Amino acid sequence: MERHAKGQLHARERLTSLFQANTFMEWGLHADHDCHDFGLEKKSLPGDGVVTGVGYIDGRPVAAYSHDFTVSGGSLGRIHSKKICDLMDYAMKSGMPILGINDSGGARIQEGDDSLSGYGQVFFRNVLASGVVPQISIIAGPCAGGAAYSPALTDFIIMTKSNANMFICGPDVIKAATGQTVTMDEIGSAHAHASVSGNIHFVAEDEKHALLLVKRILSFIPPNNVMDPPHRPSPNIDLSPDAALNDLVPADSKTPFDVTQVIRRLVDEGDFLEVQKEWAKNLVVGFGRMQGVVVGIVANQSMVKAGTLDIDSSDKGARFIRFCNVFNIPIVTLVDIPGFMPGLAQERGGIIRHGAKMLFAYAAATVPKLTVILRKAYGGAYLAMCSADMGADVVYAWPGSEIAVMGAEGAVKILYRRELAAATEPHTLEETLVAQYRDKFASPYAAARKGMITDVIEPSQTRAVLSMALRNTLSKRETRPPKKHGNIPL
């Protein structure tokens, strides 16, 4: 009852609440701990502090384990790790997602190097399973030190607002080692990881909400890398225009707008699951369906940092793109980008290396890639948002959009500096030259003449055109040069 009073469920309650009634089959129910290390008295630890097994969610099997904090603080020992590893091995062979519910005091000290070995074996399987089956982690209690690395190796991390923390070094260790005084909220809370470090993907109000988020994620992704996502294609494609899109985006490319408004007009019933919503907000990523077809969406958010790509948003985008690619999810990219984020901190922080991750992720992706240029696409950032040159299968542009090395105003000031300086009415001349530059060099029609885009479409046509293009590219097959793997600029 004490756990319930704190808003926490017991290990088995977490699993039975998640799975369909009577479908959970437990593994290792009778596993026990035989502790003779350091001459300590043998102590019984039922299940060795973890509940493992397989159950069904919406008719699909999922392998799951849940730390039992009521048994030795959910600490990891030899049998504990063996149960998890056996389950992960089975999930990989059977092709089913893996869910880990973390609520553990960490390594079991009295087992010494056996506990370290156990963590190593779990981490190894996290890596083996990566890109084979989806892996989801819930942080519902303490997750400290080396224990934090298993969730970090999984695809999605959900963390509850209360009763949970995740860190490598706690406040006391930081104080002793560096002299800094910090609080647990600053380094280990859900808020800190969601908005500052970017370590987690979703914040749950409580444990029941966390379990609902697991179901929602699974509703968009396949059980393994050889199966398709759970598409539900509409029998007849609706090609009717959506007039609301014509007036949704400001004509002035410098006026910010909320790109999620566009996304919710494009996806079925406005149902969009945004990933890492609180971190690197200048890029929006998440899942939706377009007339029944599951898509991953990547979009510039002009409301934050003018929609530029910076270090964090590049990492966020590249990671999401690579997840979509390994699990056969088509990618729709909505472009409204003035460039990469300028500044000393960005340059010294490695924006070149981080921005290159976006280039690498898109170019390496072989799933269907559909791009729509909403307003502006300038410089190298245009390429980093999946241009035709970076492997987009189709690229559409709205009539008022611009595709250029830089904005027309900046280009004219550089190209016609002398003419403007000598003009009697430089402002009038500049306006004329800007209009001419846009028409000749930066308009979508100029790009279409060069074969850089597939078509210029009205905003109202976007959902219909993308839906048709998705249906046409679902059968896409692409062969790449044989190699072990590419070397992404990490």
Image (cartoon, grey):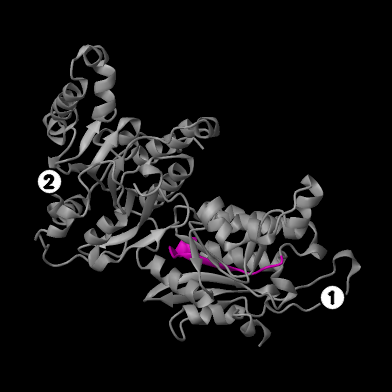
Q: Residues within 10 Å of mark 1 (few under 14, many from 20)?
A: few
Per the image, label 1 sits on a secondary structure element best described as loop
The secondary element bearing badge 2 is classed as loop
User: Which one is in front, 34 or 189?
Assistant: 189
Q: What numbered label is drawn on residue 42?
A: 1
At horizontal 63% and vertical 84% (from top left) the residue drawn is 5
The residue positioned farthest toward the bottom in the image shown = 1
Q: Which residues are magenta?
A: 91-105
Q: Residue at x 61, y 62 (%)?
A: 189
Q: Is residue 98 magenta?
A: yes
Mark identifier at residue 457: 2
19 or 29, nearer to the observer: 19
> Among all residues in the image, which is located at the extreme right?
39
On the question of residue 120 being in view, the answer is yes
- What amino acid is found at the position of numbered circle 2 in the picture? Ile
Tell me: 168 left or right of 438.
right
